[in-house]
Image: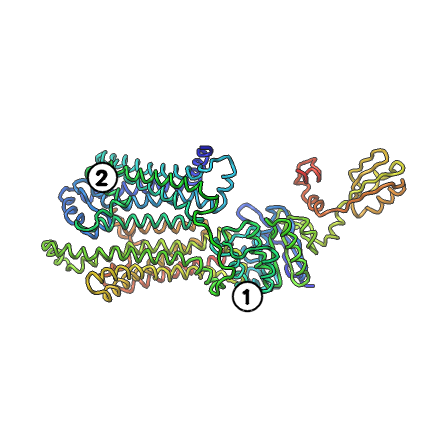
Amino acid sequence: MTAAISVSGLVKTFGPTRALDGLDLTVQEGEVHGFLGPNGSGKSTTIRVLLGLLRADSGAASLLGGDPWRDTAELHRRLAYVPGDVSLWPNLTGGEVIDLLGRLRGGLNEKRRAELLERFELDPRKKGRTYSKGNRQKVALVAALASDVELLILDEPTSGLDPLMEAVFQECVNELRGERTVLLSSHILAEVEALCDRVSIIRNGRTVETGTLADLRHLTRTSVSAELVGAPDGLAGLPGVHDLAVDGTRVRFEVDTDHLDTALRALVGSGVRALTSQPPTLEELFLRHYEDELPSGGTVEGVMSS
Amino acid sequence: MTGLGSLVRLALRRDRLLLAVWVIGLVGITLATASTVGELYGSPESRQQLGGTAGSNPAFLAMLGPLYDASTTGGVLAWRWGVFGALLVGLMAMFLVTRHTRAEEESGRLELIGSAVVARHAPLAAAVVVALAASTVIGLLVALGLTGLGESASGSFALGLAFASVGWVFTGVGAVSAQLSESARTANSIAGAVLGVAYLLRAVGDAAGDEGPTWLTWLSPLGWLEQTRAFAGDRFWVLLLPLALSAVLVVAASVLVTERDLGGGLVPTRLGPARAPRSLGSAFGLAWRLQRGMLIGWTLSLFVLGAVYGSVARGVEQMLEANPALQKIIAQMGGAGAIVDVYLASILGIIALFSAIYVVQSTLRLRTEETEFRAEPVLATPVSRFAWVGSHVLFATVGTAVVLAAAGLGAGLVHGVRVGDVGGQVARLVGAAVTHVPAVWVVAGLALALFALVPKLASAGWAVIVVFLVLGQLGPLLQLDQWAMDLSPFTHIPKVPGADVSATPLVWLTLVAAALMALGFAAFRRRDVG
C-alpha cells in the first residue's frame, strides 16, 4: 500500500503560538484514518496545510503524491473537504451550494446526491442563513460524499449532527471503506472507534501515538474485578498491576493489557467465583495521553463525569 | 432596561477607535474648513461677491444648497460644508446602529448576549444610545469649536445641532432598516438608499427655482439642516422636525423588534431553488452571484444621480441667458458652453468618488469571504487562488466602467433632452464619465494590495477613499500644496467634458493600478488563507 498522506516534522507558527511542533502523520491509501486530539491541538491547522491554505514553516508534507502547496489545483481535483465549522453564503440555497462545490470539483454523482439528501433528511431549497449548524454541516457532507474523489478530508464532520444523523454519517463512511481514503479528524471517540482502521493521536501540535486500534489497546489497561474463593495472593507484586483494591475476597485492579495473562493466572490460583473485566476503551487511551493535563489527583472517572 | 448599561459599555469598548476617528475626523474637517473659509473670504466684499454668484447658481444649489448669508464666515461654512458634513454624520449613525444590531445578530453573537440577562430591547437601545450620543457629541464639539473660532454662538449651535439632528434621524433609519432584513449588508443598503433620496430631494428642491417644487427640500432631513439657516436667522424650531422623526423611527424599530424572531427579518425568507442554475459552476459564476446585486444597485443609483445632476445643467445655462452681464463676463472667460462643462466635469468628479466606494466594496468582498470562512471551501476545490481573486477583481474593474458609464448615460440623456441633442450629449458624457475609470482602478489596486499584504488592515481601503476625497474635493479649499493633491489619482484625470484629454495620465494611472493589482495577486498567492 502507498501513502495517500505523508507528513513528517511539520512545524507551523502563528506569531508566538506554535500550532504544529514537528507533527508526523501517515495515511495509507484506502484506509479510514482517525485524527484525534483535543481542541486546539493542531488538527485543523494540519488539514489546512494539507489543503494548501497555509504554508508550513518547515517539515515535509505530501498529499496523493504531490506537494500540497505547489500542486494545489491538481490535487484538489482528487479530494473533497468538509470544514469543521461550515459557513454558507447567506443567500444561496443548500442545493445550490452542493451543486456549486460539486461542479468546482469537476462534477457530482447525481444518484448519490439525491440519495444522500434523502438519507440526511436535508431540504436543499432553504437559504444558507436559515440552516442550523447541523444542517450546514449536512450540506458540506452531501457535497463531499457525492463527489467521485479519491480522498475525503473531514474536519470534525459530525459536530452539530444529532445522534441519528451521526449514525447515517457512519453508514455512509462504512460504505465507502476500501474505495476512498478518509482522513477523519474528531474528538468523538466512539465515532473513531466505530469507523477508523488506524488512528493518530496528537497533542500540542505533535503526534503522540499512531497505529491500529488493536495496537493501541496494548498500551492500555484492562480493569478487572473478581470475587475469589480465598484471599488474593501475590497480586500486589505482579508487574503491570495498578490501583489494587482488596476487600476480603473481592478484588479490583487495573492491569496493563500486556500483563493480563499473568494477572489472571494469579487470580485463578486463589479460585475465582465471579469475574468481570472491561476492555480498554479509546476514551481511556485518549485520557492517558492527556493525563498530565488533568488536575493532580484526578481520576479518569472523575474527569469523565465532570 | 436590564443590560443596557453593560451593552453600551461593550459597544464603546469595541468601537473606541472607530468612534474616535469619526468624531475627531468630522469635527476636525469642519473646523479646518471654517478657518480656511475665513482666510479665503476674509473681507466682506469677497464674501458678498461669493453670495452674488455661487449662492444663486443652480449647479451649486443642487450640489451644496442655498447660501443664505454670505456676510459671515459661519454663513459661508454652513453652505459649503453643511450638507456634506451632515451626510457623513448620517452615514456614521446608520453604520453604528447596523453594526451593533443586525450585524451582531447575523454573526450569532447577539444570541450569546440575548441568552444572558438582558432585556429584549436592550441591544437595539444600546446601539441607538451610542449612535445618538456620537452624533450629539459631534454637534456640540462643532458648536463649541466654531464659537471658539470667533463665530456667533447662536449660529455655531444652530449648525452643530443641525449636524447632530441628521445623525439622530439616521440613527432611527438605521434602527428600522436593521429590523427589516436578515442581513446587515441589506440593512445598510436600505439606510444608504434613504440617505441618497434625502440628498436628491433637497438637491431638486433647492435647484427648482421659484416656480418649481421647492417644497421637496422640506421632505429631506438634509433639507431641514439647510432650513435651520445657521448663521442666517438660526431657526432652531426647525430642529423639532428631525427630533420628532427620530423619535418616531426609534419607537417604530422597538415595536418591530417584538414582532420578529431573533435572527429573522420582517420579510420572511422564501424557499429557493433545489438545484443551482447552470451559471453557478465556476469561480466566476460564484462571484457573479455574490456581486451582481451590488453592481446592479450601484448602476441604477449612479444612473439616477447622473440624471438628477444632468437635469440641473440646463438651469446653469438659463441663468446665464437671463443675466446678460454675467453672460458677458463668462463669455470672456470661454463662453456659456464652457461654464456648463465646468459644472458637468465637477459633478462627474464627485460621481467618480462614489464609484470608488463601489470598487472598494466589491474588492473587499474577498476579505469578507475569507473572514466568514467561505473562501476556504472554495479554495479547497481545484479553483486556484488566482482564479478566485481574479473573479472578484473582474467585477471590481469592469463594474467600475459600468457604473460610471451609467452615470454618464443618465446625465447625458436628461441634459440631452433639455438641450435637444440626446445622441451628442450621451456620447460626450459617457465618454467623460468613463475617463475617470483609471483613477478608480488605482483605488481598486490599493484595496487589493492591502487585502493581500496586510489582510487585517484590508478595511483601510475605505480610508483611502476618504483621503482622496479630502485631497481632491477639499484640497483647494484647505489650500493644500499641489504635491499633496497630486497624491490622489483623481487629481490627474482631465476635467472632462471641456478640457483636452491627454492619454498620458490615463495610461500612467492604468499602469499604476495594474502594478498594484499584480502585487496583490502575487502576495495573495504566497500568504496563508484564513
Q: Quadrant of the N terminus of chain B?
A: top left
Q: At 21% across and 35% down in the image, what residue appears?
A: B152
Q: Are marks 1 and 2 on the same chain?
A: no
Q: Which of the numbered marks, if any, corresponds to residue B457? A: none
Left or right: where does residue B184 sit relative to residue A54?
left
**B390 versus B80 height, above or below:** below
Q: At 30% across and 35% down in the image, what residue appears?
A: B140
**Residue B5 position in % (x across, y down):** 44, 33
Q: Report the front residue among A2 and A176.
A: A176
Q: Residue flagged by tag 1: what amino acid is it?
A: Gly
The residue wearing badge 2 is: B230
Determine if residue B173 is in view. Answer: yes
**Residue A289 position in % (x across, y down):** 69, 45
Left or right: where does residue A136 sit relative to residue A180?
left
Dividing the picture into quarters, in which one does residue B30 lie?
top left
Q: Secondary structure at mark 1?
A: loop
Determine if residue A62 is in view. Answer: no
